Image (cartoon, rainbow, N blue to C red):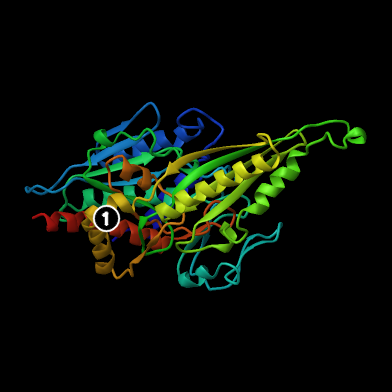
Amino acid sequence: MISKEDIIKRFVSYVTVDTESDPNSDTTPSTKKQWDLANALVQELQHIGMQDVSIDQNAYIMATLPSNVDHDVPTIGFISHFDTSPDFTGANVNPQIVERYDGKDIVLNEAENIVLSPDYFEDLLLYKGQTLITTDGTTLLGADDKAGICEIISAMEYLIKNPQIKHGTIKVGFTPDEEIGRGAHKFDVEKFGADWAYTMDGSQIGELEYENFNAAGVVVKVKGKIVHPGYAKGKMVNSMYIATEFINSLPRLETPEHTEGYQGFFHLYSVKGEVEETVLEYIIRDHDKEHFEARKEVMQKLTDELNQQYEREVVTIEIKDQYFNMKEKVEPVMHIVDIAEEAMKQLDIKPLIKAIRGGTDGSQLSYMGLPCPNIFAGGHNFHGRYEYVPVESMIKATEVICKIAELTAEKYK
């Protein structure tokens, strides 16, 4: 059995190391502090007995667990990222252990009256009676995705200690900078050498995902003209008012706070404005490729219309694709999803097959030639002070990894 105490100890040792990434940096990893955990992970992989452990100049970690069967089995991989989101501080993480959660409010920080409540986060009630790891209310936790790393290393250690569990060759990979969209950018798929892989980067127990958003980033620049406001009639052009026209012309209900499931959205996440220039930053998301392209066209058409209205180029737009729906690459090899689903069922876990309302390293890796569905890591409320993870979910995720390895070896016997 996977030890609860060992899982907690390993996970806490990871989350107490600050690995926040930085979207404004052009280095890889984007922050030097990511090396602290990366180097420790290399030592740990070597210590538990993994082979061919390596870390490259960009902090990408790879290791191998050799096959212990004498027949040919496809090489499978498990991947997680060790950076944490810059959306909320990951410095000085102080995890709280809540034994036998009673279904009531959890006071994270009494001094600041920060409470994790099932009245607001109803998923908490799924874990009544279990052991939860929470924040102290002042930082994120880092279960995204240090829970995934904890599960992968724990699974490899378990397989090494229990050679009666038969498996083919298994590769593991840990990446920097996933939270800023660069986790797969310098991942050497050829060196990794797996036929397919799984990212351990989902949330609720049972999640199994092979669809994600198509994604684009958009920068809209609106040019104005500043003159003395006392003598501005007929001369001043206030870029902020034109920017407001742009914002209000997009569908108000097609935003993150009004959408769910397969519904796409336009998300305005930054506005920086003065009379002379206003810059709007958006992301576009949609699971459907045609709808995704249509959203880009809507923003381009709106730009053109405003320029026609003002009879000059007052608005410029730059749209850059970020990643695409991995469904296109995974559907031709659906057996890799079927194996993961069967592993969960054999462990009495109800598979929750759904589309990711986001992206993972797996979406990019799938387009790089490594089909890569996503499996739950167990955490909830990522990127903020209310993040938590049930220890039992991490144990189950660890067991899923072992079972996938076992089933793959059986399937190809």
Quadrant location of residue 224?
A: top right
Above-or-below relation of 56 to 138: above
Looking at the rendered structure, the number of numbered marks drawn on it comes to: 1
Left or right relative to 6: residue 251: right
Q: Residue at x 30, y 37 (%)?
A: 62
Compared with 122, 89 (above or below) is: above
Q: Quadrant of the N terminus?
A: bottom left
Residue under the image location 34 percent in, 58 percent down: 397
Vertical side of 173 occupied by 341: above or below: below
- The local secondary structure at tag 1 comes to helix
Q: Which residue is mark 1?
A: 331
- Give the side of residue 127 with respect to residue 78, left or right: right
Q: Position of residue 398 (x, y in %)?
A: 32, 56
Q: Nearer the viewer, residue 170 or 254?
A: 254
- Residue that protrudes farthest toward the top in the picture: 57
Q: Is residue 395 visible?
A: yes
Residue at the (13%, 58%) spot, across then down: 411
Which one is nearer the viewer's eye here, 131 or 353? 353
**Where's residue 222, x and y in %?**
68, 37
**Residue 144 in sight:** no
Amino acid at the residue labelled 1: Glu
Spot the residue most to the right. 230
Q: Is residue 82 left or right of residue 315?
A: left
Measured as percent of width and height from the top left, residue 293 is found at: 45, 49
Q: Give the position of the C terminus as an image quadrant.
A: bottom left
Specify few, some or many for label 1: CA neighbours under 10 Å numbering under 14, 14-19, or 20 or more: some
Left or right placement of residue 211 versus residue 301 in this view: left
Quarter assignment of residue 258: bottom right
Instruction: State the image coordinates of residue 301 (x, y, percent, origin top left).
Output: 56, 46
